[in-house]
Image (spheres, grey):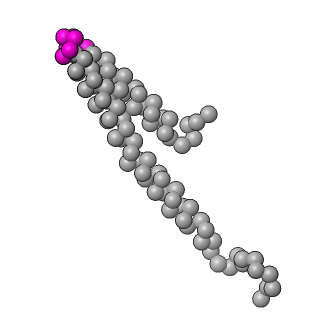
Amino acid sequence: MPLDNKPTNDSPDSSSAPGKANNFSNQFAMAMELPFVLVGAVLLGGVLGYFLDRWLHTKPWLMLVFGALGFFGGVRDIIRRMPGSRP
């Protein structure tokens, strides 16, 4: 029986279990959030283009342009949120 209060290697390290659970929950939350980011960006661009088309009588061109811009903005936001993608 050692006299110092150092932890022994006999017991499993319980400090890694909360870290693994936290990492899993963060990844799961991101996986649930990212589809909504992409769909939301496309819908926002499409709706904005739709109302501009009605106002300017240019159907369907602005809806297609703003929908495509929303798609590219959504993909850009997904890439920005992915871990390891920051320089």
Image quadrant in which you'd find residue 13: bottom right
Q: Position of residue 52 (x, y in %)?
A: 25, 17
Highlighted magenta segment, given as a residue range: 54-61
| Magenta-drawn stretch contains 60 | yes
Q: Quadrant of the N terminus?
A: bottom right
Furthest residue in direction front, as rendered:
55
Q: Position of residue 37 (x, y in %)?
A: 37, 38
Q: Residue at x 44, y 47 (%)?
A: 30
Q: As rendered, which of 16 and 56 lies closer to the eye?
A: 56
Image vertical order of residue 31 relative to residue 68, above or below: below
Q: Residue at x 52, y 56 (%)?
A: 23
Q: Is residue 73 visible?
A: yes
Q: As rendered, which of 77 and 84 lies closer to the eye?
A: 77
Please state if 34 lies on the left or on the right of 56 as rendered.
right
Q: Quadrant of the C terminus?
A: top right
Please state if 35 lies on the left or on the right of 21 as rendered.
left
Q: How many marks?
A: 0
Please state if 87 lies on the left or on the right of 61 as rendered.
right
Q: Is residue 63 visible?
A: no
Q: As rendered, which of 37 and 31 lies closer to the eye?
A: 37
Q: Residue at x 54, y 61 (%)?
A: 20
Q: Position of residue 54 (x, y in %)?
A: 18, 16
| Magenta-drawn stretch contains 68 | no
Please state if 4 lies on the left or on the right of 53 as rendered.
right
Image quadrant in which you'd find residue 3: bottom right
Furthest residue in direction bottom, as rendered:
1
Furthest residue in direction top, as rendered:
57
Q: Residue at x 27, y 20 (%)?
A: 49
Image vertical order of residue 9 relative to residue 18, above or below: below
